[in-house]
Amino acid sequence: MSTPERFDGDPTGSRLDDAVLAAVFSQSPIGLQLMDTHLRIVRVNSAARLIRQFPVDRMLGRPLLEVLRAFEVDRAEQIVGLARRVLETGQPVLDLQIHLRSKDDPPVEAVASAACFRLQDTDGTVLGLATALVDITDRTRAEARLLLLNTASTTIGTTLDVFRTAAELCEVTVPQLADSVAVDVLDSVMCGEAPTSGAVTGNLPLRRAGFRSGAPDVHQGVPSVGEVSVYRVGTPYRQVLSTLQPRLIQQVDPDSAWLDLDRTRGARLRAAGVHSLMVVPMCARGVVLGLACFYRWRDPSPFDREDLALAEQLAASTALCLDNARLYNRERSVARILQLSLRPPPPAVHIAAETAHDYLPAGSGGGWFDVIPLSGARVALALGATTGQDRYAAAAMGELRAAIAALSDLDLPPDEILERVHDLVTGPARAADQERRPDQSQPATCLYTVYDPVTRACTTARAGHPPPAVLLPDGTAEFLDVPEGPPLGEGLAHYTVGERTLPEGSVLVLHNDALLQEGPRPLHLPLDRVSRAAATAESSLQDACDAILDAVAPEQPGQDVVLLLARTRALDADQTAAWSLPNRPEAVARARKLTAAQLATWGLADLEDLTDSTALIVSELVTNAVRYAEGPIELRLIRDRTLICEVTDDSSTAPHLRRAHDSDEGGRGLYITAQLTERWGTRPGCRGKTIWAEQLLPDPTPANTSGGSAKS
């Protein structure tokens, strides 16, 4: 055994050694315990004796294992094994953390850092062990609080859902801080509203937003998550809401009067054996959002001031997340209202049809409709729905509606429009988006129908949507025979059109699933009630639409209700003129003559600008057909509120507008047409294509834009 190094000229010599030894046992702040070779406590210093809750000085002569068990030290046998190893090998053990629990009521827990080393005589004889203990309880608790706060900062507030945020606080704090935690939020906060700033007065209802218990067989508190309750005057909960000051009750008296004010909750606390609790207000941005209640019934140690300070920090950070969720819910409600207010009503009067609609919001589902003017005086009626009750459903609705409107400008047939939208929904971009959000897949249904007032043909395709009904002028009602295709985004895109020639004055009834009636499969619209409601309505189409909605809509619909009516029109024979021209150069001059004669018949010959521009447009379009097509050329003029010129040929090549150079001899036809018309375009046909151009007539008959309502 080595001897301590010292200066040989030191006059104090052995007296200094004696002083050091005396100080270690009488003045050192580090607890020192000496054990013999049998690991019995034989001597302790004064620092060890000063720990009142752990009177090790009263256990002199007792074995180490007995002492450890007396203080309920975890891993007692393992610690004794380490001590024996030090005794045998002389290899010291450093920074061994020991958790102790006293026999007091309530018990006191402590954490000590132990260093154990062997004692030897000068001749190497083993005399025993020395253990130095340092109380690190405060440091350990501080580290645990910091770790809990760090965990909370990354775990609480991962979503903008009030219930999920409250549940995250409960998950973080049980059992690290409390044995049970309950979070109650003011019911108005759930609706996105902000309570008045300052203390809460009156019996404001609170909704249980989160609960967690350390007992595996306890899944719900009192009240259960989602239920509403009111805290009574005289309870700690009501006091905290009134003062906005946290409340610490270190020792709960089972005979406390406040437990009897709320018998259900008080009985639950007594039955659980709750002995200590903390009630902390949850405030953010100057408003009170609710309460966080922490209970201990399994951990015998009561809450202390440090625990209360930690609970306040956790409640403050959670309250900020809850307020973010509240603001989000409010903005979502505003967006919903804005969505409804910005829904453009379809034109009540159209060349092809008069329309009326009703929209009954239910807070779920993305129901939508649109009335889209097409070329050739035709009109497209589109109606669809997306599933879901969140912002993704509304976003999907907007995307779907925009896609339908954009594809309608291409004048594609209904089946091809649905196929293209299906491809958009199932495309790579959408697939990548669903991979990031697999729970937000939004299958959609859609119905697309086109009505032509010249031929009175109604062409329809549907993607998982109910078929339209038609109310005929003779009073009968029936469904249009339209084969059903898969919903958009599901299965293979294969849609088939259904065609039907309708008498003038027929009423098309388009609707979503919300109006379907239970009965023999598949679900169906009750046509008998629809017919009776339409027959008893007033003269206007909107009155009929309102009556049908009142007759067939459920009292509490599970999704938004959309109903669209369209009363068909037919253009008179004297409003259209059509000719078949041979595919020869002289057809251009003949087309101009026929056009001029027809304008004169319609009384438009005096409008020189219109006559000249129409002749030039017809010349350019027919010339284009002669140059690129082979078969006969069809020329058609349609007069209503606008003048429409259509040229049909058998070439499937769509023309493109380009700017010709000064030296070019051709290439200016479509450019000239675009300059002279209000709008122009190309639509494909079964064989070939049709190029159309539309000019405004002077002093057109103003359209009646009234009609359409949003019921609530």
Image (tube, rainbow, N blue to C red):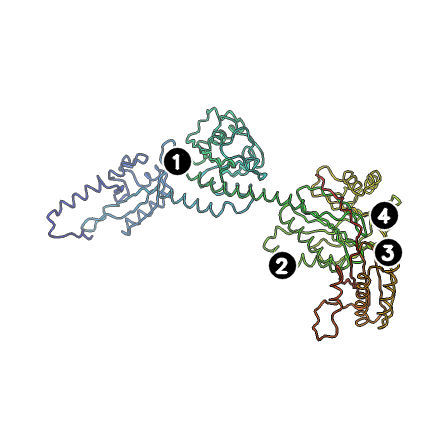
Residue corresponding to mark 1: 305
- The label on residue 505 is 4
Residue 76 location, quadrant:
top left
Q: Residue at x 24, y 39 (%)?
A: 45
Label 1 to label 4: alpha-carbon separation: 80 Å
Mark positioned earlier in the residue sequence (4 or 3)? 4
Q: Amino acid at mark 2?
A: Ala
Of the numbered discs 1 and 3, the one sitting upstream in the chain is: 1
Residue 296 appears left or right of 504: left
Q: Residues within 10 Å of mark 1 (few under 14, many from 20)?
A: few
Look at 68% across and 41% down and name the residue there: 362
- The residue that label 3 is drawn on is 575
Q: Quadrant of the C terminus?
A: top right
Q: Which mark is residue 111?
A: none
Establish if 449 lies above or below 533.
Answer: below
Q: Are marks 1 and 2 in contact (CB under 8 Å)?
A: no
Q: Nearer the viewer, mark 3 or mark 2?
A: 3
Q: Which residue is mark 2?
A: 429
Residue found 33% across the figure and 41% down from its top: 65
Q: Secondary structure at mark 1?
A: helix
Q: Is residue 91 left or right of residue 5?
A: right
Identified by mark 4, the residue type is Gly
The residues bearing labels 4 and 2 have C-alpha atoms spaced at a distance of 44 Å
Query: In 3D space, how far apart are the residues under numbered discs 4 and 3 (Cα atoms)?
Result: 18 Å
Residue 604 image point, x, y percent: 84, 58
For residue 109, which quarter of the picture?
Answer: top left
- Amino acid type at image mark 1: Arg
**Which secondary structure, mark 4?**
loop
Q: Position of residue 502 (x, y in %)?
A: 86, 51
Which of the two discs, 4 and 2, sits closer to the camera? Answer: 4
Q: Is residue 659 left or right of residue 652?
A: left
